[in-house]
Image (cartoon, rainbow, N blue to C red):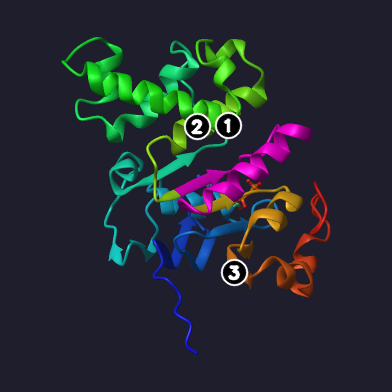
Amino acid sequence: MTTTTPAPLLAAEGITVRFGGLTALNDVALSVAPGSVVGLIGPNGAGKTTLFNAVSGVIGPQRGTVSWKGRALRRHRPHHLADLGIARTLQGLNLFPGLSALDNVMVGADRLARGGAGAMLTGLGRYHSDERRLRERAMAALEEFGAAHAAHAMPGTLPFGVQKRVALARAVVAEPELLLLDEPASGLSGADMDSLAAAIGSFRSRMGVLLVEHHMDLVMGVCDHIVVLNFGEVIAAGPPDRIRSDPAVAEAYLGDAEEVGTDG
Ligand SMILES: Nc1ncnc2c1ncn2[C@@H]1O[C@H](COP(=O)(O)OP(=O)(O)OP(=O)(O)O)[C@@H](O)[C@H]1O
């Protein structure tokens, strides 16, 4: 029997990034297939954020290629991601403080709106049916993440964990094919962490996920494949069980606050 690996949605190959004399990434490769959750881990300063930024188009690598569905992206920028079908959440929540939680999520649905959610929110344009449809969709996304009760509240009045749920709802409401998550668990604990793990697990049937994260329990629990960086190089890549027992990974984490297999 032959098995076929689905073509990756996202592929980064040979990525090298230097900041002055410092090589933050050296010939790094990573790919995310449809329906898979790929974790990117490594000790502090390993290069995770730099790779996330190179993939997102925040920075341009000196060498290497980022491809989307087999096509190399040339000088892509973060504002191109939504049109490609890629959404991301950042370490900061980046919610609009002057918009309700629901309106924040509607902004995320912009890609689905013919006239743009911006026009709807300002009352411009003739898109009432679109607006109703998107409002329902945004509400459903809030419900999915257990934040429907907060729909009409301003983000600043909400607990941090609820704000994170709103940010996640905003990221997925437009049904991206790939979701980039930069440390989504930071600042979360207990039930919020469990909900996040369940949410990421549920994304698998709808989209690929790239998860940059420090919390090992979360990474080991939800990822199909894990890439480990240390000093800007990939030192291991494989399924959670293999990563957990990889001596090179354990060694890389020695002296670091995080330990493989435990929650940091
Ligand atoms: N804009 C920059 N200018 C100079 N050096 C940078 C810059 N951004 C990152 N670096 C350096 O590149 C290396 C990789 O940093 P990066 O933030 O990507 O690591 P990380 O794995 O995300 O770390 P952490 O887990 O602490 O967030 C580090 O040595 C860092 O100091």
SS under mark 1: loop
- In the picture, the disc for residue 80 is none
- Regarding residue 46, the answer to whether it shows in the image is no
Residue 161 x %, y %: 66, 26
Residue 19 x %, y %: 49, 53
**Viewed as shown, does residue 65 lie left or right of 52?**
left
Rendered view: 40 above or below 84: below
SS under mark 2: helix
Tell me the residue at 65%/54% (across/down): 222
Q: Which amino acid type is marked by label 3?
A: Val
- Residue with the mark numbered 3: 234
- Residue with the mark numbered 1: 145
Mark 3 and mark 2 residues within 8 Å of each other at the beta carbon:
no
**Sequence-first disc among 3 and 1:** 1
Rendered view: 196 above or below 243: above
Label 3 within 8 A of ligand 1 by Cβ: no
- Check if residue 117 falls in the magenta segment: no
Mark 2 and mark 1 residues within 8 Å of each other at the beta carbon:
yes
**Viewed as shown, does residue 164 lie left or right of 170?**
right
- Residue with the mark numbered 2: 169
**Sequence-first disc among 2 and 1:** 1
> Which residues fall within the magenta stretch?
179-208
Q: Residue furthest bottom?
A: 1
